[in-house]
Image (cartoon, rainbow, N blue to C red):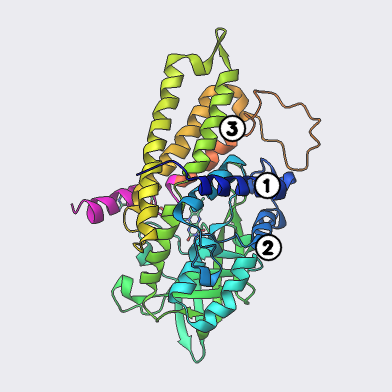
Amino acid sequence: MDMRFSPEELAFRDEVREFIANNYPHELKGARRGEMSKEDILKWHRVLYKKGWVVPHWPVEYGGTGWTITQRYIWNEENARAETTPLLPFGLSMVGPVIYTFGNEEQKKRFLPGILSGDDWWCQGYSEPGSGSDLASLRTKAVRDGDHYIVNGSKTWTTLAQHADWMFCLVRTDPDAKQQEGISFLLIDMKTPGITVRPIITMDGSHEVNEVFLEDVKVPAENLIGEENKGWTYAKFLLGNERSGIAGVARSKKAIERLKKIAGAELVDGTPLMKTGEFSRKVAEVEIDLSALEVTELRTLAAESKGRGPGPEASILKIKGTEIQQRITELAVEAVGNYALVEAPRLETTGNEFVPGPEGSQGTAQDYFNMRKTSIYGGSNEIQHNIIAKMVLGL
Ligand SMILES: Cc1cc2nc3c(=O)[nH]c(=O)nc-3n(C[C@H](O)[C@H](O)[C@H](O)COP(=O)(O)OP(=O)(O)OC[C@H]3O[C@@H](n4cnc5c(N)ncnc54)[C@H](O)[C@@H]3O)c2cc1C
């Protein structure tokens, strides 16, 4: 594999770099998602939509950019480099591809424009109390009643449902069939009577996740994706995309760069922490793992460009990517000690406040706590190990 960029690719990189420098909303620099308003979260999305760059990974006919795999790689790298806010995956990477792959023409016309523009905010209604890892045991039921389904049940851990206009939802439509064969994929308007959203506050103090209760919610039958009772197929397709997007290689590179800067400024008996053998060895280990993951991700992307969608290999990206993300936050806490507890300045601060600790270290503990989620969501890492054992190694 030739890892060098061609002159055209370097020119593309410069174009992207300049675009981000000139167009990224400056007020969002360094912002954490937990403290951003709905409009803040959507600002960068809207800029990219206007430019036509909001879904580089979609087919051109639906709004994709037609970029090569290398261009998409460069795009991710440059966004990480500039520390732009990641776009929300629920519409762009999850339900969007399900709709253009399995939806009918009417559904494509109705839903894709709102996903692209950001006007429709989506959330993911998969997990339920008691049905997380064992997702196929889900109990939220949808009963057909003329032109509608009547939905009853509850979902949990629903990320950013407090802002959502729509939820893509797995529901049980045949209670008598084998678990996987009685599930359907429904699109539910969050304004429908009977839906209640309650916040769950996580240990970093943020409100990202929710419980969603559905009581006699009337959903038009035309909101069913594909065939009734075939929802598990679409659900698995979506999870494959979710897992490959979770690797976060470019952003981990940036996080290591930041970690090195902090550890370079922290002194241990007069020596920068980064120059002590023990700490630099730990950082080097993570960097090596990240380089290996990067090559694995490039191989997956190359296979995808030849029409081979992300298969069980996506589980490898998920496990390694999230382990690395967590490891970096653990090293950051180790590097700054007590200063980790200093909260990150909020978006609206003036910049004149005194913040103790090395530059860039504020919010380290918040990041550490927040990153614990990565080995749980998108299917826990233990479950990913099971998938690799079964589907990749044939054990
Ligand atoms: C921050 C966050 C955001 C989330 N966002 C969403 C969202 O937007 N929408 C959504 O639908 N879901 C979301 N989830 C839910 C997530 O997908 C589930 O938490 C996850 O699938 C695990 O399910 P569970 O929490 O029920 O844990 P359980 O399934 O109860 O698992 C508990 C523990 O047992 C282990 N375990 C379970 N079964 C096995 C097994 N067979 N072999 C080995 N170990 C096993 C698990 O790995 C885990 O460590 C989110 C979760 C988090 C933490």
Which quarter of the figure has residue 285?
Answer: top left
Residue depicted at x 35% and y 49%: 299
Determine whether, in the image, residue 282 is placed left or right of residue 208: left
Where 51 falls versus 345 (above or below)? Answer: below
Badge 1 amino acid: Glu
Task: Give me the C-alpha separation between circle 1 and circle 2.
Answer: 25 Å
- Crowding at dot 1, Cα within 10 Å, few <14 / some 14-19 / many 20+, comes out as some
| Residue that label 1 marks | 35
| Sequence-wise first label, 3 or 1 | 1
Q: Is the residue under label 1 in contact with that under label 3 (CB below 8 Å)?
A: no
Q: Residue furthest top?
A: 269
In-image side of 350 versus 243 (left or right): right
Magenta extent: 375-395
Amino acid type indicated by mark 2: Lys
Residue 353 visible, this angle: yes
* 108 w.r.t. 197: above or below: below
Q: Considering the numbered disc 3 on the image, is that residue within a helix, a strand or a loop?
A: helix
Instruction: Name the residue at the bottom extreme.
Output: 146
The residue positioned 36% from the left and 38% from the top of the image is 292
Per the rendering, the mark at residue 50 is: 2
> What secondary structure prevails in the magenta region?
helix
State the residue position of label 3. 364
Q: Nearer the viewer, mark 1 or mark 2?
A: 2
| Mark 3 vs mark 2: in front | 2
Residue 150: image location, x then y, percent: 51, 82
392 vs 56, left or right, is: left
Residue at point 56%, 19% (across, down) = 264
**Does residue 328 sit above or below 152 in this rendering?**
above
In reply to whether residue 386 is colored magenta, the answer given is: yes
